[in-house]
C-alpha cells in the first residue's frame, strides 16, 4: 500500500497517510491539529539499483567504469 504525503494549510504540518491506490483520501485530517484543510504534497523519489553509490558493482551512472570521483 502506498503512502501519500499531505500538508495542512492551517498549521503547516506535513504528514503521511497510508491507503490503497484506489482509495486515496482527498482531504484527510491533519495528524497534528485534526482539521481537514489539507493538500497533497508531490515529492520526488529515487530507486536505488546496481548503479547506486555504494553498490557492490563499484560503478555509477556517470562513469560506468567505477573510476569517477563519486563512486571509486
Image (cartoon, rainbow, N blue to C red):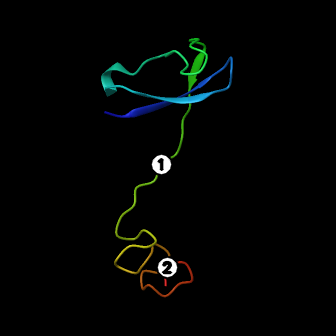
Image coordinates of residue 65 in percent, x first then y, are 42, 85
Q: Is residue 59 left or right of residue 33?
A: left
View extreme (front): residue: 32
Image coordinates of residue 67 in percent, x first then y, are 49, 88
Label whose residue precedes the other's in the sequence (2 or 1)? 1
Secondary element at image label 1? loop
Tag of residue 26: none
Q: Is residue 70 left or right of residue 1?
A: right
Q: Residue at x 42, y 80 (%)?
A: 64
Tally the numbered discs.
2
Crowding around mark 1 (Cα neighbors within 10 Å: few <14, some 14 to 19, many 20+) is few
Q: Are marks 2 and 1 in contact (CB under 8 Å)?
A: no
Image coordinates of residue 22 in percent, x first then y, are 31, 22
Label 2, label 1: how far apart the Cα atoms are: 21 Å
Q: Residue at x 58, y 22 (%)?
A: 39
Q: Residue at x 57, y 83 (%)?
A: 69
Q: Residue at x 45, y 75 (%)?
A: 60
Image quadrant holding the N terminus, namely top left
Crowding around mark 2 (Cα neighbors within 10 Å: few <14, some 14 to 19, many 20+) is many
Q: Which residue is mark 2?
A: 71
Secondary element at image label 2? loop
**Residue 40 is drawn in which quadrant?**
top right
Q: Which residue is mark 1?
A: 45
- The residue lying toward the viewer, choosing from 16 and 26, is 16
Image coordinates of residue 63 in percent, x first then y, are 48, 81
Amino acid at each position: 500500500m502506498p503512502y501519500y504525503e499531505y500538508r495542512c494549510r492551517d498549521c503547516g504540518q506535513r504528514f503521511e497517510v497510508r491507503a490503497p491506490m484506489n482509495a486515496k483520501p482527498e482531504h484527510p485530517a491533519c495528524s497534528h491539529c485534526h482539521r481537514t484543510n489539507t493538500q497533497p504534497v508531490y515529492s520526488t523519489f529515487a530507486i536505488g539499483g546496481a548503479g547506486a553509490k555504494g553498490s557492490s558493482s563499484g560503478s555509477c551512472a556517470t562513469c560506468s567504469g567505477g573510476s569517477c570521483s563519486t563512486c571509486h
